Image (cartoon, rainbow, N blue to C red):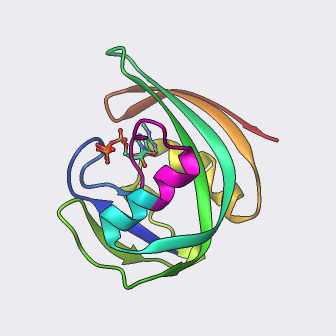
Amino acid sequence: MLLIRKKRGLGAGKINGPGGKLEPGETPLQSAIREAQEEIGVTPSQLEERGLLHFQFTDGYSLQCTVFIARAFTGEPIETPEATPMWFDIDGVPYDDMWEDDQYWLPQVLAGAHFIAWFEFDGEKMLSKDVRFV
Ligand SMILES: CNc1ncnc2c1ncn2[C@@H]1O[C@H](COP(=O)(O)OP(=O)(O)OP(=O)(O)O)[C@@H](O)[C@H]1O
């Protein structure tokens, strides 16, 4: 599985999938493809929408994320100022280096599941979780 180590912004230093904020007029699918191009120089294809994440931080910040997996890509993964590309075995996902919520939905997504989830965070500390597989 091709993931990234994020170099700046929210979650800098953590392993994550490529991703970021929607630009005006963009769909989540278009944004997912563009972010992978910008962050590690690849164009993902055969994307599948698998879940919706809602994060509420105690300082008032909140974000909603749409989760996709991509079965293929074109291009060669490259390091950019935003991210370092990293390959992992499906059974060696580095949850200790990821956001705390990921361990509660990514294993199921990798096994084929769809989900919707709500998490509360105080900084990097997860305070509560509600994960529903649908
Ligand atoms: C709190 N628990 C969390 N658990 C798992 N993943 C989390 C996350 N919080 C944020 N993410 C992910 O991090 C990426 C960038 O988030 P985001 O806020 O858009 O930051 P970023 O500055 O990189 O956006 P731009 O690239 O500038 O658009 C994006 O893939 C988003 O899904």
Query: Is 106 left or right of 43, judged from the image as shown?
Result: right
Q: Nearer the viewer, residue 17 or 121?
A: 17
Q: Residue 58 in the image: x percent, y percent? A: 37, 16
User: Where is 128 relative to 18, above or below?
Assistant: above
Please report the bounds of the magenta region as a residue range.
Answer: 18-33
Query: Is 86 left or right of 88, judged from the image as shown?
Result: left
User: Where is 23 relative to 94, above or below?
Assistant: above
Q: Residue 44 in the image: x percent, y percent? A: 52, 71
Q: Residue 27 in the image: x percent, y percent? A: 55, 44
Q: Residue at x 59, y 75 (%)?
A: 90
User: Where is 64 relative to 91, above or below?
Assistant: above
Q: Is residue 24 magenta?
A: yes
Quadrant position of ligand 1? top left
Look at the magenta stretch and give its main secondary structure.
Answer: loop
Q: Residue at x 67, y 53 (%)?
A: 49
Quarter holding the C terminus is: top right
State which quadrant residue 37 falls in. Answer: bottom left
Q: Nearer the viewer, residue 28 or 98?
A: 28
Count numbered badges in the picture.
Answer: 0
Residue furthest left as drawn: 81
Q: Residue at x 23, y 59 (%)?
A: 82
Q: Is residue 126 magenta?
A: no
Q: Does residue 18 show up?
A: no
Q: Residue 26 in the image: x percent, y percent? A: 49, 43
Query: Is 95 left or right of 116, judged from the image as shown?
Result: left
